[in-house]
């Protein structure tokens, strides 16, 4: 059998080293990861040449809708995600290669020993597009608008532990109900764009401090931007103007890219990416993602309340074949816990669980279960979910486990099947931090604990890790938690899906940011156009 | 026009017989209003029946109970269905379609733009396809069962048999990707010149022409052939009427009804049913607008779009019926 991981990396960039290969070879040469990473960004720049300024950048993007709105608090779509990144800035950004917090509108920060009080120094001399300078007042009001009781902000969920936001001698001070070492990373959320006066007077003004000023916006159709000449940063915003066009049809995006009408498209279908690669002017951009496709069992419902049965079902999953067949190789195998190496403090060295019919047979026998197991699925669970279920049925059969597949209707799947029925297919998008991921779906009291994984010791560890400022200790805690979910949880996680974008070869400087799709939304401000 | 009854008292004939056309139009308009009301109830009920309300679907994965509650209370979603329906109806009757729940923009303003785009595309497609279809239909009759008839039939049937997105993709592949002569995507926006607009919609227009052509063409052909073979045409010929006069006086009035009906059906389709073509060509029309709204259960927008679509269908069908009646004396003076 071919090695999927290596196979994937060779599919990466068509020329030069990609990050993973580079780091792998650098590690072999005895360099540390940090040194390797920083060296990579230099070599990447050298390989692509110095950034050229000027030109008109056109993006064809899936995910825009007539219901899109400029108010960053209500941003929902992939399209407004990129728009917010164009015109606005957050207090903190995440490092594209290792995911740590790096300064943006906040210059620096420090926390109290229990990580429950945080002080941020706000950058001076930054101007909004309307010429006014960013003040601490704007920052405080912005955060208030996203966290107060009447807030309709999409960031409300991740900020609910905030008890107080105030201005102390020109610095921003945030108090939390409990310690949270990840607070700076939470402030990278794309909803939390700093607006003049907090955006209270006119939330839809799209006035920010970003590298581009909004010129026109037709929801679900198109948005145009021009360069912000007063940008406080010189290492971004290389093009003169940006045009974003909503293209929700995959074939339309591919046609627009291959006919040279746009420079960049998102959401390339893994099934057709090999055909697109043949187009002479096209480059495929692959980014490791945090999203994952899952098979979830309720740990508190028979027959899944038996850990041996859960282990049997985990060993009956052929992850490599899943990545090859369902993702066409554009993804990484999963290890039954929801974290991969794109998260900061990823616990390395946990052995990879592989397809093992003998072990599956052993645990199945030990569980004493008899008869077939009902798995519910639908193509809305994730692209190819029904095929994945059939594939799983086949590999489980070899271990003597009989899985019965029930195909459920797509509409209503998320309200009638997911988080309701004891065994079904589903997907998860990533979260900014490990803490967020575990708190959303693995804490006993979480609404979306879709595996009914209820363990007091796990909850305690989660809360302790949240407030732990010592990164080594914290990493060790996350390691324990990962092992608990992997060996005792109800999650079967065969694969993490990659983000697939494509660009015209004239577009240079794309950074495969591990934070999120489309260079974490910063695609327009990071790239430039060669002649 | 008064008839004298046997007892000598004059009796006015009922309105229906004195002004048949006016009464018919008024009747139809009244029926249409009733139909629109029914449609609005159906849409409202349909969206209500979909799983998840606006607050849930709009917030999606980032939904927290508090954010959902905030949105619900702001929009008054916790009130009973009937209250909300009648409130909406009361405003709509006064021409106020409200604001989109999702974007907060005025629905009428948004629809104005999108409907304009849809009508523009439909008009361009109709102005080409209707004369072409009728002309080709007549040509096919003229060369009935001979080579030109066969060719017209095969090509138009092939076009209708291919799904519209496939025709669209083929056109894009050849004319914009391979030869680079046509513009793609067909995104139109404010401030675009008329010539640019025309060039942008060239490919979608051709696609739509292909899609609707066969239906209208074949109906024209069938209608004329069936009329030509009827007994009264033979009689007209035998009594010595000229060919031209035969067609105008006897054939056309009888053939026009089915043709007009199928033309109306296709015109309505061009306005309301082209969401697939819109998506393929990235054209900002009504279809995509409504689909976006349904996805998040944005009721005011769904209602307004639904009513406009229903109105277009009803109106075009009514006009078709009227034309058929006016053109045909047999229908104009029913016994």
Image (cartoon, rainbow, N blue to C red):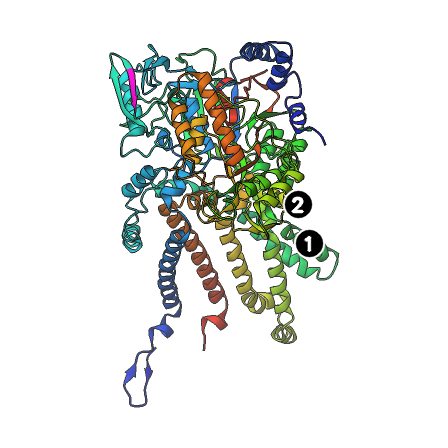
10 Å neighbourhood of mark 1: few (<14), some, or many (≥20)?
some
Helix, strand or loop at mark 2:
helix
Is residue A246 visible to the viewer in this orientation of the structure?
no
Majority secondary structure in the magenta region: strand
Is residue A305 visible to the viewer in this orientation of the structure?
yes
- Judging depth in this view, the residue of A353 and B208 nearest the camera is A353
- Judging depth in this view, the residue of A381 and A252 nearest the camera is A381
Q: Quadrant of residue B64?
A: top left
Query: Marks 1 and 2: which is nearer the front?
Result: 2
Q: Quadrant of residue A23?
A: top right
Q: Pointer 2 indicates a residue of which chain?
A: A
Q: Which residue is mark 2?
A: A394
Outermost right residue: B147
- Tell me if label 1 and label 2 are in contact, CB under 8 Å: no
Cα separation, mark 1 vs mark 2, equals 51 Å
In the image, residue B103 lies in the stretch drawn in magenta? no
User: Residue A452: x percent and y percent?
Assistant: 45, 41
**Magenta stretch, residue numbers:** A172-176
Q: How many marks?
A: 2
User: Residue A76: x percent and y percent?
Assistant: 42, 34
Q: Quadrant of the C terminus of chain A?
A: top right
Q: Pointer 1 indicates a residue of which chain?
A: B
Helix, strand or loop at mark 1:
helix
Q: Which residue is mark 1?
A: B152
């Amino acid at each position: 059998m071919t090695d999927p991981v290596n196979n994937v990396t060779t599919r990466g960039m068509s020329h030069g080293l990609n990050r993973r290969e580079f780091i792998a070879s650098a590690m072999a040469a005895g360099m540390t990861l940090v040194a390797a990473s920083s060296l990579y960004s230099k070599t990447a720049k050298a390989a692509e040449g110095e950034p050229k300024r000027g030109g008109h950048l056109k993006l064809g993007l899936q995910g825009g809708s007539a219901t899109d709105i400029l108010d960053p608090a209500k941003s929902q779509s992939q399209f407004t995600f990129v728009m917010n990144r164009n015109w606005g800035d957050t207090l903190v950004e995440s490092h594209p290669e290792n995911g740590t917090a790096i300064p943006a509108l906040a210059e620096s920060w420090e926390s109290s020993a229990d990580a429950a009080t945080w002080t941020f120094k706000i950058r001076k001399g930054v101007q909004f597009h309307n010429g006014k300078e960013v003040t601490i007042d704007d920052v405080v009001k912005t955060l208030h608008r996203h966290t107060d009781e009447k807030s309709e902000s999409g960031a409300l969920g991740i900020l609910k532990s905030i008890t107080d936001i105030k201005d102390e001698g020109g610095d921003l001070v945030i108090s939390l109900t409990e310690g949270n070492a990840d607070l700076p990373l939470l402030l990278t959320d794309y909803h939390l764009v700093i607006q003049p006066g907090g955006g209270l007077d006119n939330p839809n003004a799209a006035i920010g401090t970003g590298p581009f000023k909004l010129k026109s916006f037709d929801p679900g159709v198109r948005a145009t931007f021009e360069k912000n000449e007063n940008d406080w940063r010189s290492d971004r915003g290389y093009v003169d103007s940006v045009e974003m066009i909503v293209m929700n049809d995959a074939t339309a995006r591919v046609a627009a890219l291959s006919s040279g009408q746009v420079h960049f498209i998102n959401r390339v279908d893994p099934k057709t990416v090999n055909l697109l690669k043949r187009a002479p002017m096209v480059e495929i951009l692959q980014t490791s993602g945090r999203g994952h496709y899952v098979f979830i069992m309720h740990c508190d419902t028979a027959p899944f309340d038996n850990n041996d049965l859960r282990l049997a079902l985990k060993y009956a999953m052929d992850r490599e074949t899943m990545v090859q067949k369902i993702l066409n190789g554009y993804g990484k195998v999963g290890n039954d816990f929801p974290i991969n190496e794109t998260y900061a403090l990823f616990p390395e060295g946990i052995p990879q669980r592989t397809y093992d019919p003998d072990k599956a047979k052993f645990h199945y026998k030990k569980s004493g279960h008899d008869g077939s197991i009902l798995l519910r699925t639908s193509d809305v669970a994730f692209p190819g979910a029904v095929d994945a279920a059939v594939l799983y049925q086949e590999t489980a059969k070899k271990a003597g486990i009989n899985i019965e597949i029930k195909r459920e209707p797509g509409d209503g799947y998320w309200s009638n099947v997911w988080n309701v029925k004891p065994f079904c297919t589903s997907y998860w998008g990533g979260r900014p931090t490990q803490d967020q991921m575990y708190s959303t779906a693995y804490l006993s009291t979480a609404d979306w604990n879709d595996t009914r994984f209820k363990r007091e010791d796990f909850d305690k560890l989660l809360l302790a890790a949240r407030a732990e400022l010592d990164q080594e200790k914290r990493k060790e805690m996350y390691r324990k938690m990962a092992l608990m979910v992997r060996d005792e949880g109800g999650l079967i996680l065969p694969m993490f899906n990659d983000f697939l974008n494509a660009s015209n070869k004239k577009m240079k400087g794309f950074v495969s940011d591990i934070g999120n799709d489309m260079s974490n939304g910063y695609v327009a401000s990071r790239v430039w156009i060669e002649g | 026009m008064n008839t004298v009854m046997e007892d000598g008292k004059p009796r006015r004939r009922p309105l229906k017989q004195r002004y048949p056309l006016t009464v018919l139009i008024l009747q139809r308009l009244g029926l249409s209003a009733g139909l629109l009301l029914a449609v609005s109830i159906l849409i409202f009920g349909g969206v209500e029946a979909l799983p998840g309300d606006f607050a849930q679907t709009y917030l999606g994965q980032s939904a927290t109970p508090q954010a959902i509650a905030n949105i619900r209370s702001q929009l008054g979603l916790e009130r009973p269905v009937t209250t909300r329906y009648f409130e909406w109806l009361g405003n709509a009757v006064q021409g106020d379609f409200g604001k989109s729940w999702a974007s907060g923009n005025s629905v009428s303003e948004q629809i104005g733009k999108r409907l304009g785009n849809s009508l523009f595309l439909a008009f361009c497609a109709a102005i080409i396809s209707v004369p072409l279809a009728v002309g080709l239909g007549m040509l096919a009759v003229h060369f009935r069962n001979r080579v030109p008839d066969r060719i017209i039939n095969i090509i138009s049937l092939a076009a209708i048999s291919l799904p519209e997105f496939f025709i669209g993709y083929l056109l894009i592949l050849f004319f914009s990707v391979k030869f680079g002569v046509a513009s793609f995507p067909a995104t139109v926006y404010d401030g675009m010149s008329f010539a640019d607009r025309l060039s942008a919609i060239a490919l979608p227009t051709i696609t739509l022409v292909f899609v609707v052509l066969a239906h209208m063409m074949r109906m024209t052909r069938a209608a004329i052939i069936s009329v030509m073979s009827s007994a009264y045409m033979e009689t007209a010929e035998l009594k010595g009427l000229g060919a031209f006069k035969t067609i105008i006086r006897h054939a056309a009035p009888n053939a026009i009804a089915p043709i007009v009906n199928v033309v109306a059906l296709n015109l309505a389709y061009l306005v309301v049913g082209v969401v697939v073509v819109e998506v393929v060509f990235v054209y900002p029309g009504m279809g995509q607008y409504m689909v976006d709204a349904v996805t998040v259960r944005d009721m005011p927008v769904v209602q307004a779009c639904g009513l406009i679509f229903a109105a277009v269908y009803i109106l075009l069908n009514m006009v078709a019926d009227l034309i058929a009646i006016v053109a045909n004396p047999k229908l104009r003076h029913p016994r």
